[in-house]
Amino acid sequence: MQAQILAPAAVLAVWSLVMLFWMAGVRLPAMKKAGIDMGARPGGRGQDLEGVVEPKVNWPAHNYSHLMEQPTVFYPVVVILAVMGAGPIDVALAWAYVGLRIIHSIWQSTVNTVTVRFVLFMLASFSLVALAIRAAVATLLADPSALPA
């Protein structure tokens, strides 16, 4: 198994947790300022804050949700490539994906211009598509006799 391809996945996992704390660090004070008593109502959801706090407060939460969506494809693709034998192109594509997702996070959580965000998302998506295709090819064309027992 090759650790080089796993490093971008580890970094994206850590970044996702950074966004979790960023979201909490922005939302909790905004909820207090808005007079929201978290203990007063059971069963609230993050979406309930839409329209209650200023939109910018929700931007890190929106991004955190995004990091729980598409990267769920990235993680198994990286594991498949690690098992099958990732090459330098795979590692570069994985780092490109993670770098673009981090830039996307920072952009969405601070500036949030949709056109720029979309370009960042699409570039990251193209990296992921290439990785997924390479993982599919690596498994579909694998020589079973060449794989470790």
Image (spheres, helix red, strand yellow):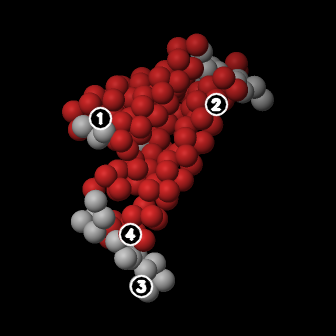
Label 3 vs label 2, nearer the camera: 3
How far apart are the two marked residues, 2 and 1, measured between alpha carbons?
A: 26 Å
Q: Which residue is mark 1?
A: 117
How far apart are the two marked residues, 4 and 1, measured between alpha carbons?
A: 29 Å
Which residue is pictured at 41% across the width and 25% down the height?
Answer: 127
How far apart are the two marked residues, 3 and 4, measured between alpha carbons?
A: 17 Å
How far apart are the two marked residues, 3 and 2, measured between alpha carbons?
A: 42 Å
Name the outermost residue toward the right: 149
Q: Which mark is residue 41?
A: 3
Q: Type of residue at label 2?
A: Leu
Task: Please identify the quadrant where the C terminus is shown.
Answer: top right
Name the outermost residue toward the front: 33
**How packed is label 3: few (under 14 Cα within 10 Å), some, or many (20 or more)?**
few
Which residue is pictured at 42% across the width and 71% down the height?
Answer: 32
Q: Position of residue 87 (x, y in %)?
A: 59, 15
Q: Which mark is residue 33?
A: 4
126, 27: nearer the viewer: 27
Label 4 vs label 1, nearer the camera: 4
* Left or right relative to 138: residue 100: left
**Disc with the residue nearer the chain's start (4 vs 2):** 2
How far apart are the two marked residues, 1 and 3, measured between alpha carbons?
A: 35 Å
Q: Position of residue 95 (x, y in %)?
A: 53, 24
Q: Position of residue 88 (x, y in %)?
A: 58, 13
Instruction: State if disc 2 and disc 3 touch (CB < 8 Å).
Output: no
**How packed is label 2: few (under 14 Cα within 10 Å), some, or many (20 or more)?**
some
